[in-house]
Amino acid sequence: GQQVMQIPQYQHVQEGEDFTTYCNSSTTLSNIQWYKQRPGGHPVFLIQLVKSGEVKKQKRLTFQFGEAKKNSSLHITATQTTDVGTYFCAKTGANNLFFGTGTRLTVIP
Amino acid sequence: NAGVTQTPKFQVLKTGQSMTLQCAQDMNHNSMYWYRQDPGMGLRLIYYSASEGTTDKGEVPNGYNVSRLNKREFSLRLESAAPSQTSVYFCASRRDSTYEQYFGPGTRLTVT
C-alpha cells in the first residue's frame, strides 16, 4: 500500500541511552518527513530529507536518508525525559502525506 | 498567529447523530487536511483540499464529508456517526514552499 513501515512499534530506554527508529518503503521516496507527537498532543514537524544519503542533525537528533531513498532513520543520542513521545515518518504524495505507524518512545528516569 | 485551530476539543455522540468538526488556519496555506488517529494505526488521511474550492478523498473517506468554506476554513462532517468513528481527529495545513504540515490540537470524538 501507500504506507511506510516503521519499526520498532515501541521502545523503552533508560534515560541517557540512545534510541533509533527506522522507516522503510518498498518504493523509492521523493523525500521523507519526520514528526514528533508528545502524549496527548499533536504531531509537530521535525525535518524533511530530500537527497540520497542525506544526514541532518538537530542537537541530539540525527536523521538519515538511505542511499537508495527507500529507508530513513532517526537516532537520538543520550535520551532525556523530554524525548518521550511517538515519532512518525511520512512519505510525500502529490498533495498529501502517508504516515508510518510510529514508534512510541518511553524514557525511564 | 494562532496556527491551526480546531473546535470542539472533545465530543461525545450517540450512534446516528451528526456533527461538524471545524478547522481554521491563519497561515495563508492553500492545502488543508483531515486525519484520524487510532491506536496502533498512525494517522490516516480522510480528505484533503489542495486549494480553495477543491476537495479530494484520502485513504478512509467513507462516512465523512468535507467543505472548504474559504481559504482559511475546512470542515469535516459526520452525517450519521458510528462507533467505528470513535477516534482523534486532526486538521492540518501545509506550507506551500516546504511541504511541512502544521497540525491543530485535535478533536477527541467518542461515539456510543
Image (spheres, coloured by chain):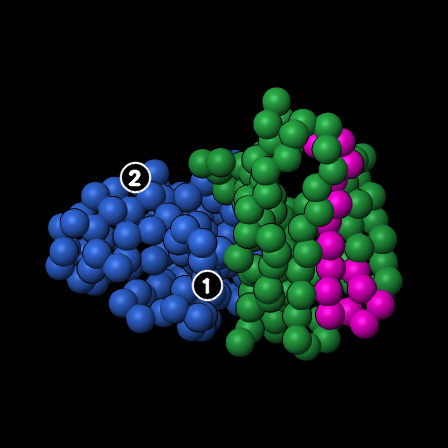
Chain colours: A green, B blue
Using the image as rendered, state which of residue A104 and residue B24 is in the foreground. A104
Q: Sequence order check: which comes first, mark 1 or mark 2? A: 2
Q: Position of residue A93 (x, y in %)?
A: 61, 71
- Apparent side of residue B83 relative to residue A97 in the rendered image (left or right): left
Instruction: Residue under label 2, please give it.
Output: B10
Q: What type is the residue that disc 1 sits on? A: Leu
Q: Quadrant of residue A14?
A: top right
- The residue segment tinted magenta is A65-80
User: In which quadrant of the rendered view does residue A12 lie?
Assistant: top right
Q: Where's residue A62, x and y in %? A: 79, 45
Left or right, B69 with reference to B2: left
Magenta span includes B106: no
The quadrant the C terminus of chain A occupies is top right
Q: Chain of mark 2?
A: B
State how far apart marks 1 and 2 are (Cα). Answer: 20 Å
Instruction: Name above or below for residue B99 compared with residue A47.
Output: below
Against A68, residue A61 (above or below) is: above
The circle on residue A78 is none
A93 w.r.t. B31: above or below: below
Residues at discs 1 and 2 both on one chain: yes
Q: Amino acid at mark 2?
A: Phe
Q: Nearer the viewer, residue B53 or B17?
A: B17
User: Which residue is pictured at 53% across the width and 76% down the height?
Assistant: A1
User: Which residue has dot 1 on it?
Assistant: B45
Chain that bears disc 1:
B
Circle 1 SS class: strand
